[in-house]
Amino acid sequence: MYLTSSFIPHLNSISVYYNRHVHRLLGFTLAFLLSTSTLFAQKINYDEALVPVYELPELLKSNNGTLIKTKKEWENIRKPELLEIFSSQMYGRTPSESISVQYEQIAENTRALGGKATIKQIKLSFSNNNNVVNAILLLVLPNQVKGKVPIIVGYNYKGNHSVMTDSSIIYSENFKLVRDPKHQDWIRGIQSNRWDFEQIIQKGYAVATMCYHDIFPDQEGFKAHSIAALFSDYPNTKTDAWEAIGAWAWGSSRIVDYLETLPYIDQKRIAILGHSRHGKAALWAAAQDPRFNIVIANNSGEGGASLAKRKFGETIAIVSSIKPFWFAKQLNQYHHREEDMPFDQHMLLALIAPRPLYVASAENDLWADPKGEYLALYYASPIYALYRKQGLTNASLPKLHQPILQDVGYHIRAGIHDVNAYDWYCYLKFLDQHAKK
């Protein structure tokens, strides 16, 4: 399948517009790196020739050396081992404590998007230990669908108001903690390019989105305002305690809890989609929660889909130093020591099998290591084979705009670290292939 010519101008215009902003962002990032550690700036590798020779841990060999030959052995032996590895070494342990939640619909607009959609806004109030955290879920439903509707779950970066210009959308509660009142991110629709509702609604899919700051504000020092503060072990200072990515994954599953109360949502067709840090959280959420029937990770990079042992672009040392509250502190032991890791991200992707899984990259997003993202999916494919599913059989990165649409999917497109119309075009094709069987 190829990119149709009608998408090319749209894609180019998006790239031109965002290149102006990405240059400023890259400048800020580089300045930050230089000011905090010149070592990072000097060691960032964008040269494939400098990728070290590496050996990936074996998927099909258990901790005691037993070879895994069947899907039953995978599910009963190896899969629990890998879940334990990622819990103890990277994302932290998700608490088992049950947190009380109440749902309240606080707004509804049945004529959104020119009458094509209904918007519902639901306040989720989590409470425990005399503490309450409120999160607002934005539910966008296609009006033309009769019967149960498939749905895409995903966080937004800049508040629910950012995904479209609709004035009825209520501002996300925790956004005020991370953005000054005069900041441009308060503008409605400021990030609507990442949510192609024209395509989504036309194809008959619903969307459940929430500002990730409502679950765990993405800024140092605000953990007390996150859902982590509700748990009885807070503050948990153990090195395997969960942090932001673990909390965001937990929050995604709580969205599904609410969706299970809605008779018009098809519970067998719930997809999760995440971009960048949200892609990391989406993969970890899906690895733990089988209710996510289809999984899409867009430009998820280090700590997401890309192989850490390649030491290309962003590394373990960089990602967990720039954002030390994303990952469990236990991950810090692998700074500049990726070769000693007893795991890598192909194992995370394998935990999602046999469910349909899509990984996507952008040509200019070398920071996220597109080749490493593709190879992780390739090396996870033997687990899909156990289930007689079609994984990747070619280790070579495909050409631009030639998506692979099988039981696993992949594309690399022109442009930068973002989500655009072409990405949605591919994702909706993939969803049609699997959610509408």
Image (cartoon, rainbow, N blue to C red):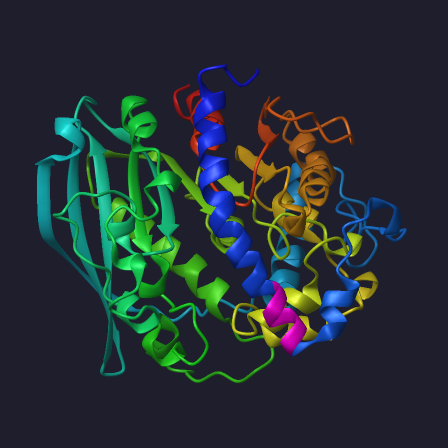
Quadrant into which the C terminus falls: top left
Total marks placed: 0
Relative to 417, 424 lies left or right: left
Magenta residues, dominant SS class:
helix
Which quadrant of the rendered structure holds the N terminus? top right
Give the residue drawn at x 69%, y 30%: 385
On the image, the x and y values in percent for residue 314 come to 68, 58
Q: In this view, does 104 lie to the left or right of 87?
A: left
Residue 290 appears in the rendering:
no
Q: Looking at the image, can residue 236 be seen?
A: yes
Q: Between residues 54 and 415, which one lies in front from this camera angle?
A: 415
Closer to the camera in the image, 178 or 148: 178
Q: In which quarter of the image is residue 214?
A: bottom left
Q: Observer-nearest residue: 141 or 412?
A: 412
Place of residue 96 in the rendered image (x, y in percent of width and height, measured from the top left): 43, 68
Rendered view: 7 above or below 343 = above
- Quarter of image, res 92: bottom right
Where residue 210 sits in the image (x, y, percent)? Answer: 30, 53
Determine the residue positioned at 69% across, 25% down.
399
In the depicted view, which residue is nearer to us: 387 or 135? Answer: 135
Residue 197's place in the image compared with 51, above or below, is: above
Is residue 34 found inside the magenta-colored segment of the image?
Answer: yes
Magenta span = 30-35
Q: Which residue is drawn at 53% across and 32% down?
A: 356
Q: Residue at x 76, y 43 (%)?
A: 68
Residue 253 shown in magenta? no
Residue 377, quarter of the rendered image: top right
